Image: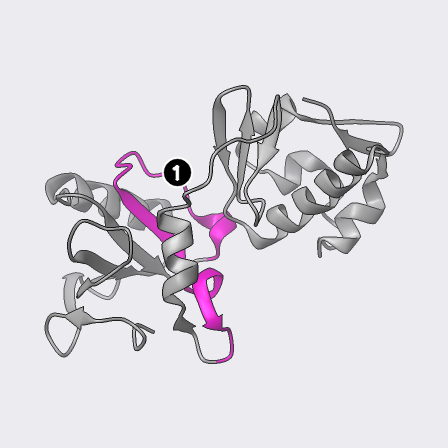
Amino acid sequence: MLVAFGRAGPPRPAPLIADLVWDVGTITLSGAKGPVPVWFARRLGDPAVWAQLEALVGRRPPQEIRIILTSTPGERIPEITQKRNHIINVADVAGDAAKLAISPQVLGARVFPGQAQRRFPIDHSDDYGIVWLRGETLTFRSDKQRQLLGLLFDAYWSGSPECRTAAVLFEAGYKDGTNAFSKVFNGRDDWRSFIKYADGNCWIEP
């Protein structure tokens, strides 16, 4: 996965939590002040595993930042309390999804977005993974959530913001069982501050 990076560390990942978390060494990442430690973790959607990881990063804080790569899909990764740890699904930063080789440019953009709110009261990053709303920063990790936000924002900027809810959910890749935004954004309510819906329609309204 890290073939495109300058990596330092042991030839094989060192286990930190048996069968769950490994230390992969450090990589050189544009934008970082020094070598960036990298871990790999799995099964982060399991509350027991997540609790172990939170405890581990609490005991071992990074000097600047740490990247924790994972096979867990972005929508199943909880919000970490230790903000210097960036938990990223491998497929989200792969230069070639078929090979799972991580792109230094894509990973760098995720860790150091280098973007700021340009339009007010609402704006978003190029990949719709970050939404800025009146000074508040909202982060969306799921590919499908970002796809959905892209559709809604495209309509918003076009001047015709209303979309058919069923149509945008289908186009974003949600199955028939996901028929409400409460299911799309399961476990969080901050989307309600800028996404509105009524009578089968939905739209951005900051």
* SS at badge 1: loop
- Say which of 74 and 32 sits in front: 32
Q: Which residues are magenta?
A: 73-98
Task: Depth check: give the residue in front, 53 or 7.
Answer: 7
**Left or right of 102: which side holds 124?**
right
Q: x, y percentage for residue 51?
A: 27, 42
**Residue furthest right in the image:** 199
Q: Residue at x 81, y 38 (%)?
A: 158
Residue at image point 54% right, 42% down:
125
Q: Indicate yes or no whether the magenta region holds residue 81.
A: yes
| Residue 186 location, quadrant | top right
- Confirm whether the magenta stretch covers residue 170: no
Residue 195 is situated, as x and y percent measured from the top left of the image, at 69, 29
- Can you give x and y, in whole percent of width and height, for residue 144 in the image? 63, 52
Q: Which residue is mark 1?
A: 79
Compared with 169, 138 (above or below) is: above
Q: Residue at x 76, y 34 (%)?
A: 156
Which residue shows up at 54% across the image and 29% down it?
Answer: 132
With respect to residue 159, does 96 lie above or below?
below
Q: Quadrant of the N terminus?
A: bottom left
Q: Tell me if mark 1 has few (under 14), some (14-19) or many (20+) residues whose alpha carbon lies within 10 angstroms of its own.
A: few
Q: Quadrant of the C terminus?
A: top right
Residue 176 visible in this rendered orientation of the protein: no
Position of 134 with respect to 79 (left or right) is right
Task: Residue lying at the far front in this picture: please name it.
Answer: 118
Q: Nearer the viewer, residue 45 or 127?
A: 127
Q: Amino acid at mark 1?
A: Glu
Q: Is residue 157 above or below residue 98?
A: above
Q: How many marks?
A: 1
